Image (cartoon, grey):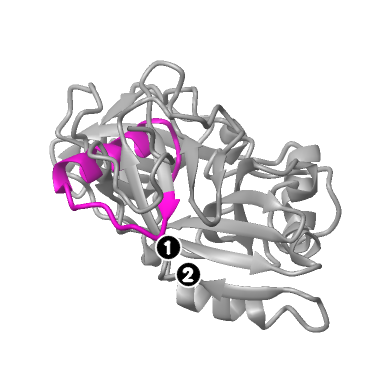
Amino acid sequence: MAILDKPGVVDAGCFALPDHAVISLEGRDALAFAQAQCMSDVAALADNGWQWSGWLTPKGRVIALFAVLRLGPEQVWMLVPDGDTEALAARLRGLVFRSKVKVEARPDLHVAGAFAAPEGARGAVLAGDAASGVELDLGDGTLPRRLRVSAVAAGPDPAAQARWHAFDLAHGWPRLPPSQTEAWTPQQLSLDRLKAYSVRKGCYPGQEIVARTHFLGKAKRGLVLFGAPVAPAAGSDVLGDGKPLGTVACSGDAAGSGFPAAALALAVLPLERDDSATLEADGRTLAVLPLRDGLAR
């Protein structure tokens, strides 16, 4: 059964992603508001297009990461993993002023995933609509994944949810816990790999810092994927030969990732470093792993 064939029925292959939620922007100025606040070039999206994005502080630090979905000329969704959408929506509403846009957290919408090819979505083009449900292609060209947002909740599957999380980490999509809010710049999280920010569009919070870092070549740290016997806590120091070298941004189980490790971690480290150093976090040895490609949109 196609994921969007019967809006009131859950596809048997889907499982709940309760750590994902939606914020909707609706109204005449929805696109303009999203363009002014998001770090990606939302104005470049056509209807039914989507892209990775985020919201920054004026100092260029990441408040939240999300996917931006353009459902129409007056309707934009932000698909937020790991964030408090009620609090985030409240902060965004404080910036509406006279704009004709309604910003709402949408607890009535449920997010589900499946390790299967999408029925209609392809790459950065979504399928469906707000009424029947929306489908995204979140595969990497080798391993298929589809994500659905609709009014119907899927059943829980903790093992599949952990595998989904591991896939994100393996491909360099940071799953930031609350402790890492406003800790990192887009460059430090290597979000250029996912085309998640723009250095050429007009003003947005943090744009000056992001553009200056890009054009002056001052990015000194970036994202590194590690394997570990146990997931180190976000915020833990990464030590190189016993000396502080970087910081863990997020971590989780390596379930189904195919890597020879029990856990994965994304850490921010200097771009220039001694690769022969013994690396550890939380007292456990880390092994550098290659970040996988294919998730850029």
Image coordinates for residue 225, horizontal then vertical, percent: 37, 33
Q: Amino acid at mark 1?
A: Leu
Q: Which residues are magenta?
A: 149-174
Label 1 residue SS = loop
Q: Amino acid at mark 2?
A: Arg
Q: Nearer the viewer, residue 19 or 123?
A: 123
Pointer 1 local density, CA inside 10 Å: few below 14, some 14–19, many at least 20: some
Left or right? Give the position of 155 relative to 221.
Answer: left
Left or right? Give the position of 161 relative to 229.
Answer: right
- Residue sitting at 72 percent across and 50 percent down? 210
Pointer 2 local density, CA inside 10 Å: few below 14, some 14–19, many at least 20: some
Q: Nearer the viewer, residue 263 or 139?
A: 139
- Residue sitting at 78 percent across and 47 percent down? 211
CB-based contact (under 8 Å), mark 1 and mark 2:
yes
Residue matched to label 2:
106
Image coordinates for residue 141, horizontal then vertical, percent: 46, 18
- Residue sitting at 67 percent across and 44 percent down? 197
Residue matched to label 1:
109
